[in-house]
Image (cartoon, helix red, strand yellow):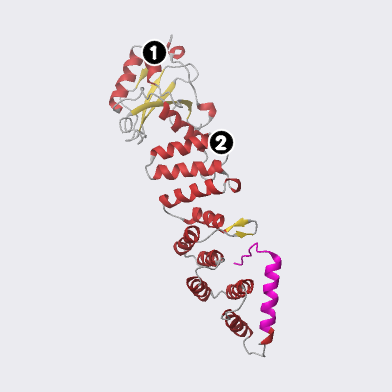
Amino acid sequence: MQLSTSIPARLVLSGVCIVAVLLCSGCRQAQDPFAETQQHLYTLLQQEDLPQESTYTVINRLANNLLAVKEYNELILFLTDYVEKHPDNIYNGYWLLTVAYVYLQMGAEPAAEYYFDRIINTCPDLEIENTTIHFLCLQNLIQISQSSVNRISYFTQIIQRFPEKVNTTELYYRLATEYESEGDWDQALKAYSAFLAQPDCSTIQIPGEPNAYSQAQKLIDFNNSPKDWTFESLEALESAIKKAISSYNYRALDSYKSKVNFFAMSWKQDEYDTNSQENFSMRSFMTGNRIRYNAELDEATNPNEAYLRTWGWSNYVSVWYLYFRKVNFPIDPEIHGRWEWAGIYFGEML
């Protein structure tokens, strides 16, 4: 993998010319042209009076020659040894970037991550082909790092340092999910709020996150809500719902419905479909109808979700399944694990 820096062309050309002259001065017929060329370059590199631009050119030539023949281990050893012996070389970040890319080429992602991270923390930034090595490192680290703690750092750095080079809307969402993975809910909420503050948050398509906007909005809305519709247990919720239906108390039923993204839809619809989000009163469906419910919850009920089959609501679709679910909200231990009436499924269960 060949990299080219945005070093001034005059500087590079002068270095190339010097190297070419020095190489030609020692040329002789060789049985192994590659080994002969590399040996000349190694010899040139040992010269104490070699100008800085020529040093860069020699190292770059050596590295690219080794890359061309896939001598990865020799290349890694050469560049890391040079950086170790010349800690003040301004191009060390560039050489270590090459090492990191070679490790990627070899499938050694942990080693590549080490060098990408090392460049950010120990090497000054350096411009390469209209971008910088720190930006390239952060891009790669976000892709290969398996640590949420590290990924939080990388997302934060790239948002703060290079906002014009990335889609900050997507990265705020990614950052929020990493905080969520770490259980840092305060920071997760801040990142979700930053995501929702972006002008394209409702239209952005984030790979692997088809409902990013709806999920973020739901979490923020739920956090800001009183949450006074939740019940301590499924049994308490089921009992209250059945009592309200039996007494045709539509006001009680309306108060039991979740006030955040309550849905009413067919089994084939998606909960996040805007057409499934309904906020209607139960009054119009209870008046003049004879509503009934099963004595037991449906067999599809599990520790986190429950279904109550009811019927008699409408001449068009008589059967409604009331959907209950356990609240997943670790931010608030007093709410987390309670139960809510989250929606309605119309028709027989598919």
Q: Position of residue 147 (x, y in %)?
A: 41, 53
Q: CA distance from mark 1 to mark 2?
A: 38 Å
* Magenta stretch prevailing secondary structure: helix
Side (left or right) of 59 relative to 177: right
Is residue 147 positioned above or below 345 on the image? below
Query: Is 4 covered by the magenta stretch?
Result: yes
Quadrant of the image occupied by residue 183 = top left
Q: Which residue is mark 2?
A: 198
Q: Position of residue 34 (x, y in %)?
A: 62, 82
**Label 1 sits on what residue type?**
Arg
Q: Nearer the viewer, mark 1 or mark 2?
A: 2
Q: Residue furthest top?
A: 288
- Give the magenta part as a residue range: 1-23
Q: Position of residue 159 (x, y in %)?
A: 53, 46
In front: 169, or 294?
Answer: 169
Q: Which residue is mark 1?
A: 251
Q: Pick whichever of labels 1 and 2 is earlier in the sequence.
A: 2
**Label 2 sits on what residue type?**
Gln
In front: 166, or 350?
Answer: 166
Q: Who's the residue at 34% across and 35% down the image?
A: 304
In front: 102, or 273?
Answer: 102
Side (left or right) of 2 relative to 219: right
User: Looking at the rendering, in which quadrant would you find the C terminus?
Assistant: top left
Query: Is 297 covered by the magenta stretch?
Result: no
Q: Who's the residue at 48% across and 63% down the image?
A: 115
Is residue 86 positioned above or below 41 on the image? above
- Disc 2 secondary structure class: loop
